[in-house]
């Protein structure tokens, strides 16, 4: 046994230096962005006055609010359906264990481009291209759906067992049959989960793209803010929360039904 004392947890000076560098940069960034405690406390007081003007919520113009909510719901459903349908072939072509490099790279480039920008930025571009209204919002949400579902679907395919795929290929089946009987049964449950999550995400995003004129309840919300109609703003926010929670419950039900059905079919 060595006579020299040994430390159970030796000091790692590189880690300490890294944490000090991070702390120094946080302090530097806060000073550059004019983040001060006095400004923060002032904002708390202004936020309290803003909340006081929001309550109680005013549902007197429920017809206008309902019209915006229905439009947001329709935008989310249409965008999710089209986006998921496009994500199937794109995700399949992006899977490196099934497709050659000349097919995977263009598909992965499309996915990367779709994921590069926030839906609000994409919505601004489509508003400039096709004009104000729900069409711009639907196109923006389709792009977001392709970026998210396409990437996850490609990764799910890359994790499958190739034994089932090779067994189908050994029968002389064409590529479409290989996908239908060797690939999709292994990823169907996860794909349903991806699709329902994207629908839930599009419900939230459909309320945001309307702020830039791409349809939905976001336009009504932005107009209420501009009129300083804060009690109506509160009513819209409550309605959006209720719609998102209802969509979450429906998505959980769909996932539970299809995942359980897939497990029964496998057994």
Image (cartoon, rainbow, N blue to C red):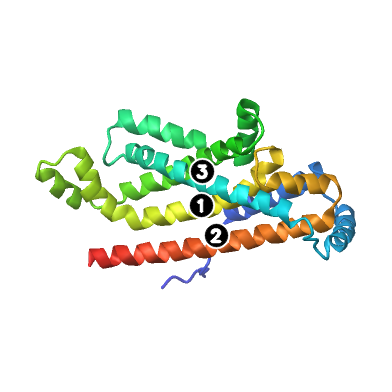
Q: Nearer the viewer, residue 91 or 232?
A: 232
Q: SS for tag 3?
A: helix
- CA gap, disc 3 and disc 1: 8 Å
- CA gap, disc 2 and disc 1: 8 Å
**Earlier-in-chain disc, 3 versus 2:** 3
| On-image quarter of the C terminus | bottom left
Q: Nearer the viewer, residue 14 or 31?
A: 31
Q: Farthest residue toward the front? A: 63
Q: Residues within 10 Å of mark 2 (few under 14, many from 20)?
A: many
Q: SS for tag 1?
A: helix
Q: Nearer the viewer, residue 239 or 11?
A: 239
Residue for badge 1: 199
Residue for badge 2: 247
Q: SS for tag 2?
A: helix
**Earlier-in-chain disc, 3 versus 1:** 3
Residue at x-position 81% and y-position 48%: 225
| In this view, 175 is above or below 182 | above
Asked if the residue under mark 2 is in contact with the one under mark 3, i.e. CB atoms within 8 Å, the reply is no
Measuring from the top left, give residue 250's x and y in whole percent: 50, 63
């Amino acid at each position: 046994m060595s006579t020299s004392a040994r430390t159970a947890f030796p000091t790692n000076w590189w880690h300490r230096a890294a944490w000090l560098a991070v702390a120094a940069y946080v302090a530097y960034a806060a000073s550059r962005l004019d983040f001060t405690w006095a400004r923060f406390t002032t904002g708390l007081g202004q936020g309290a006055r803003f909340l006081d003007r929001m309550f109680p919520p005013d549902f007197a113009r429920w017809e206008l609010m309902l019209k915006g909510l229905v439009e947001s719901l329709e935008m989310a459903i249409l965008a999710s359906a089209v986006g998921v349908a496009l994500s199937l072939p794109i995700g399949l072509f992006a899977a490196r264990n099934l497709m050659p490099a000349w097919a995977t790279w263009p598909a992965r480039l499309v996915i990367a481009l779709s994921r590069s920008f926030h839906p609000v930025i994409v919505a601004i571009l489509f508003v400039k291209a096709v004009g104000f209204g729900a069409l711009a919002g639907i196109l923006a949400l389709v792009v977001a759906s392709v970026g998210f579902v396409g990437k996850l679907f490609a990764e799910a395919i890359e994790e499958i067992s190739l034994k089932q795929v090779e067994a189908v290929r050994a029968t002389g089946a064409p590529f479409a049959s290989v996908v239908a009987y060797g690939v999709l049964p292994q990823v169907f449950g996860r794909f349903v989960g991806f699709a329902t999550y994207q629908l839930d995400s599009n419900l939230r995003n459909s309320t945001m793209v309307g702020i830039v004129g791409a349809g939905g309840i976001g336009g009504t919300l932005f107009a209420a803010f501009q009129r300083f109609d804060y009690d109506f703003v509160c009513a819209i926010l409550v309605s959006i929360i209720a719609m998102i929670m209802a969509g979450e419950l429906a998505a959980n039900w769909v996932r539970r039904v299809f995942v359980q059905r897939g497990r029964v079919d496998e057994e």
